Image (tube, helix red, strand yellow):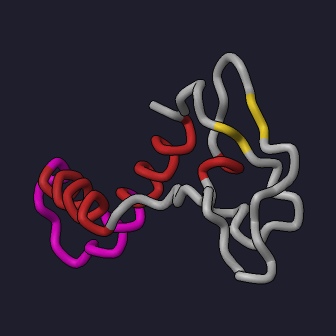
């Protein structure tokens, strides 16, 4: 994760499990919101940063994993889940 992102403590925020401001690792200096920016009256956060990869990114990596394994059939879900996990880990670690 970059050093210039404002982090969030996720205090009672329903989005904290998938928000990169809560889930990502910080290297170096850390800045935090003084209070969680989630607006309960509107049920949204203007600063939400989704830590889940796009479907297209997962599709491309899953295809690459499938090719690297010798194009084995009937393992579609395995490659999809592996690709998704790798991309989430990559986003959260900032690599």
Residue nearest the viewer, comparing 34 with 95: 34
Q: Where does residue 7 sit, x and y in percent of width and height?
A: 71, 41
Q: Is residue 69 magenta?
A: yes
Question: Which residue is nearer to you in this view: 57 or 10?
Answer: 10
Percent coordinates x, y for residue 91 in the rendering: 48, 44
Residue at screen point 60% across, 35% down: 5
| Magenta-drawn segment | 68-82
39 with respect to 73 (left or right): right
Quarter containing the N terminus: top right
Which residue is found at the position 71% from the left and 81% from the top?
A: 43
Is 67 magenta? The answer is: no
Determine whether 10 is above or below 93 in the image: below
Q: Residue at the spot x=67%, y=17% of the render? A: 28
Judge left or right: residue 77 versus residue 22. Answer: left
Q: Quadrant of the C terminus?
A: top left
Measuring from the top left, give residue 92's x and y in whole percent. 56, 43
Figure quadrant of residue 49? bottom right
Q: Is 44 positioned to the left or the right of 67 in the image?
A: right
Which residue is found at the position 69% from the left and 68% from the top?
15
């Amino acid at each position: 994760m970059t050093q210039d992102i404002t982090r969030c403590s996720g205090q009672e925020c329903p989005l904290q499990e998938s928000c990169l401001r809560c889930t990502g690792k910080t290297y170096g200096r850390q800045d935090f919101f003084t209070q969680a920016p989630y607006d309960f009256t509107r049920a949204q956060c203007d600063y939400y940063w989704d830590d889940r990869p796009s479907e297209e990114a997962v599709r491309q990596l899953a295809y690459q994993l499938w090719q690297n394994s010798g194009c084995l059939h009937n393992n579609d879900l395995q490659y999809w889940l592996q690709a998704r996990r790798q991309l989430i880990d990559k986003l959260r670690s900032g690599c």
